[in-house]
């Protein structure tokens, strides 16, 4: 560990574990999680793009969620993967700030997209007759644009304050990417302003407002479901929300464990484990939750497989015919 107490131009990223006997198993695990996340979310994107049955607001936002999961996983895991292959754990100061910025921006955008999906479910259940008018394609695109712009704009102050830290006790980051908390732990500069900003803007604006925007529609949804006379109708209405609600609970619980749990001597190690779950497991679980609990996605997957099989048989028969000729 380099004791430097001055401005740094680069950092060493420790990775998930420094134990030699664990490096290969962890690399294979992370690689498997990364490839599975890419495969699952790319499949969702392909289905939403190709199948006209999924050209609805719900799956439009699900496609945005898949893009966010792919981007977030790539930003956070690529250094751990390249470090094992190349042995290079160095990131420049600018690259480190970019890691922190894009991770925070993508997380904030995902919370807003989930809030937009919650509003979509509210309109579908509480105002079904006007659903296609209220959730038109233009409105969906506008909502998605606002979510992306807000997510990427609201974390600029965090990154600016962090980038102006002029003193670090070490340039050895005990994490697998440049996250805010590990960098704050290393800094010997005055971090009170960043702590205050995270406690106010970070918790209340970036966290609490999207949470309220997500929860409030569900209060009205539950009230509307309770008014449905038939148990079949209530079950069907709840089923349409179950996938989204599961993803919301999973993400918010993980973020709470990451940033609002009490600090301790081993807080960085626990933070690293929760970060790994948040950046590798949650993006993998999202497409699984939506595909396993959603009949539309299952049907679209079957149609895609049938189409691919038909195209393969067609090309195979064509090649067979050419050989015979």
Image: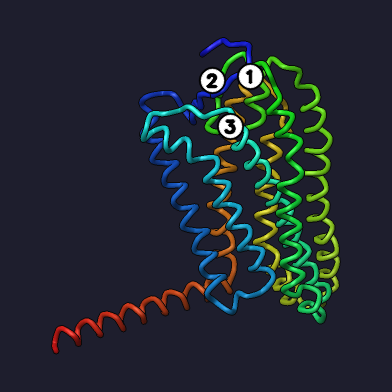
Q: Which mark is residue 172?
A: 2
Nearer the observer: mark 3 or 1; the answer is 3
Whole-number angstrom distance, CA of label 3 to CA of label 1 = 13 Å
Return the residue nearer the eye: 111 or 287: 111
Tell me the crowding category of disc 3: few under 14, some 14 to 19, or many 20 or more residues within 10 angstroms, Cα based.
Answer: many
Front-most of 189 and 275?
189
According to the picture, the residue beneath numbered tag 1 turns out to be: 186
Residue at point 66% right, 74% down?
A: 56
Measuring from the top left, give residue 143's x and y in whole percent: 76, 62
In the rendered image, the vertical position of residue 137 relative to residue 155, given as above or below:
below
Residue denoted by label 3: 96
* Secondary element at tag 1: helix
Q: Which quadrant of the view contains residue 312? A: bottom left
Left or right of residue 262, residue 321 in this image: left
Q: Secondary structure at mark 3?
A: helix
Q: Earlier in the sequence, mark 2 or mark 1?
A: 2
Q: Measure the alpha-carbon separation of dots 2 and 1.
A: 8 Å
Say which of marks 3 and 2 sits in front.
3
Q: Quadrant of residue 294?
A: bottom right
Quarter of the image where the C terminus is located: bottom left
Dot 3 or dot 2: first in sequence order is 3
Marks 3/2: CA distance? 12 Å
Mark 2: few/some/many CA within 10 Å (<14, 14-19, 20+): many
The answer to whether the residue labelled 2 contacts the one labelled 1, judged by CB atoms less than 8 Å apart, is yes
């Amino acid at each position: 560990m380099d004791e430097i107490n001055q401005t740094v131009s680069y950092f060493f990223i420790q990775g998930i574990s420094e134990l030699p006997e664990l490096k290969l198993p962890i690399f294979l695990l992370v690689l498997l999680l990364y490839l599975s996340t890419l495969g699952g979310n790319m499949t969702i994107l392909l289905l939403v793009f190709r199948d006209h049955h999924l050209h609805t607001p719900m799956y439009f936002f699900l496609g945005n969620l898949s893009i966010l999961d792919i981007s977030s996983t790539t930003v956070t895991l690529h250094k751990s993967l390249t470090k094992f292959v190349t042995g290079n754990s160095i990131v420049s100061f600018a690259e480190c700030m970019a890691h922190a910025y894009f991770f925070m921006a993508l997380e904030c955008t995902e919370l807003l997209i989930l809030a937009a999906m919650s509003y979509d479910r509210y309109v579908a259940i509480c105002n079904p007759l006007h659903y296609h008018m209220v959730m038109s394609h233009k409105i969906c695109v506008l909502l998605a644009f606002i979510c992306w712009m807000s997510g990427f704009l609201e974390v600029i102050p965090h990154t600016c304050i962090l980038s102006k830290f002029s003193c670090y006790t070490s340039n050895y980051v005990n994490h697998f990417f440049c996250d805010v908390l590990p960098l704050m732990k290393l800094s010997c500069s005055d971090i009170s302003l960043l702590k205050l900003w995270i406690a106010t803007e970070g918790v209340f604006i970036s966290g609490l407002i999207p949470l309220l925007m997500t929860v409030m529609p569900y209060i009205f949804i539950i009230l509307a479901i309770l008014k449905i006379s038939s148990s079949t109708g209530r079950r069907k209405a709840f089923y349409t929300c179950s996938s989204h609600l599961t993803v919301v609970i999973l993400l918010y619980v993980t973020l709470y464990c990451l940033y609002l749990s009490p600090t301790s001597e081993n807080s960085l190690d626990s933070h690293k484990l929760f970060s790994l779950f948040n950046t590798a497991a949650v993006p993998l679980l999202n497409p699984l939750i939506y595909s396993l609990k959603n009949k539309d996605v299952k049907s679209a997957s079957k149609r895609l497989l049938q189409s691919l099989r038909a195209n393969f048989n067609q090309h195979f028969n064509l090649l067979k015919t050419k050989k015979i000729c």
